[in-house]
Amino acid sequence: MEARGGTGEAAILVAIGANLPGPDGAPPIATCRRAAAALDRVLPGVRLVALSGWWTSDPVPPQPGAPRFVNGVARLRASGALPDPAALLAALQRLEAAAGRERPYRNAPRTLDLDLIACGALVRDAPDPVLPHPRAHRRGFVLCPLAEVAPGWRHPRLGLTVEALLAALPAEEPRPERLPD
């Protein structure tokens, strides 16, 4: 059984985030919007079919003085078989690099962060990328926009819907705020 989005196709879900200006000085939301558009051509046969609204959240884990993140989720569809997750991850990392992403330390502020959340119903612990993303089910800043693009989506490992995962978040988990359209 495949993890499905709201329209019945196998869901390739990508979280989009940024909290630093791009190399051209563009605000994080502009970088995220450009990255979302680029996802429509990230790999041959993979197309963007849904994009959430934009949300804002504090960095997780907390980083005093770090700017808030802009977050969203894109749902992609493959015209044939699902792409190789390693090839998809490499393509996402090329988009990050083009947006000036640097990795000076774990969870550093960033110009662009693209995380592969799920690739159909694929469950794998190695090699990278681990699927589904190992922390996405505990992050409101991923789950809130994911619920917009794939209502009823089931976590391939846990079997819970995105709505159940949102409801199960601890009260102390920082909640994102929806940005106006």
Image (tube, grey):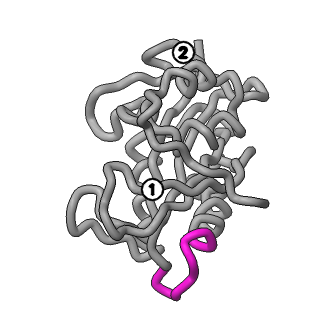
Residue 103: quarter of image? bottom left
State the SS at label 2.
Answer: loop
Q: Position of residue 47 (x, y in %)?
A: 69, 48
Residue 83, percent from left and from top: 52, 39
Whether residue 150 is in magenta: the answer is: no
- Image location (x, y in percent) of residue 24: 52, 88
Task: Name the residue located 45 percent from the left edge and 56 percent from the top edge.
Answer: 58
Which residue corresponds to mark 1? 58
* Residue 125 to residue 65: above or below: above
Camera-nearest residue between 117 and 82? 117
Q: Which residues are magenta?
A: 22-31
Q: Please, what is the three-letter code of the amino acid marked with disc 1? A: Asp
Number of other residues with Cα within 10 Å of mark 1, as a class: few under 14, some 14 to 19, many 20 or more: some
**Which residue occupies 66% across, 56% down?**
54
Tell which circle, 2 or 1, labels the residue nearer the N-terminal end.
1
Which type of secondary structure does the marked residue at label 1 adopt? loop
Mark 2 burial class by Cα count in 10 Å: few <14, some 14-19, many 20+: some
Whether 39 is drawn above or below 148: the answer is below
Query: In percent of the image, x 45 and y 74: which residue is there?
Result: 20
| The residue positioned farthest toward the left in the image shown | 105
Q: Which mark is residue 26?
A: none
In magenta segment, residue 28: yes
Res 40 → quadrant: bottom right
2 vs 1, front mark? 1
> Where residue 66 appears, x then y in whole percent?
36, 68
Q: Residue at x 57, y 71 (%)?
A: 31
The residue tagged 2 is 160
Q: Of helix, strand and loop, which mostly describes the magenta segment?
A: loop
Q: Amino acid at mark 2?
A: Leu
- Residue 114, relative to residue 132: is it above or below? below
